[in-house]
Image: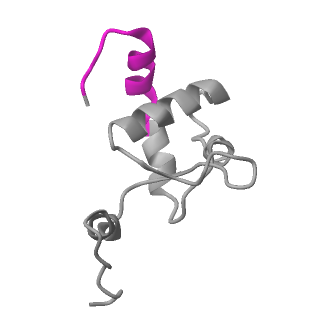
Amino acid sequence: MNLSSAPADRQFEENWQAVLAVLRERTVALTCPEILAAWPEDEERPAVSSLYRWLNLAVAQKLVRRDGAGSRGSPWRYRLETDADRYRDRGQLPPPLGW
């Protein structure tokens, strides 16, 4: 990650580890409200708008994957990259599990 002096970027840098901790604990992609609900109790919970901004930065920096359409029926869901994503990005099917 590139450290920046912009206040929004500093907020992202300061809070990224908490976001990452929530995503690492889950095996499925989470919506923004689900991430907030799972926020570490020893950390100050951010405003929804701040978390969305951090998640958008993380997507732009390819730190997380975003699935969904961003609509009520198909909300954005955020997750960490998996080995299977690398295959799909190349237009290939990942190997079957257990190989």
Quarter of the figure that contains the C terminus: bottom left
Where, by quadrant of the figure, is residue 6 drawn? top left
Quarter of the figure that contains the N terminus: top left
* Rendering coords of residue 77 (x, y %): 57, 52
* Rendering coords of residue 90 (x, y %): 25, 66
Q: Which of 46/29 is in front?
A: 29
Residue at image point 51% right, 48% down: 22
Where, by quadrant of the figure, is residue 42 drawn? top right
With respect to residue 43, does 99 lie above or below? Answer: below
Residue at image point 57% right, 41% down: 40
Q: Which residues are magenta?
A: 2-17
In the displayed image of the protein, which residue is found farthest to the right? 72
* Rendering coords of residue 85 (x, y %): 34, 65
Q: Is residue 44 left or right of residue 62?
A: right
Magenta stretch encompasses residue 5:
yes
Does residue 43 appear in the picture of this structure? no
Magenta span: predominant SS is: helix
Residue at image point 32% right, 79% down: 93
With respect to residue 32, does 84 lie above or below? Answer: below
Residue at image point 36% right, 57% down: 81
Magenta stretch encompasses residue 68:
no
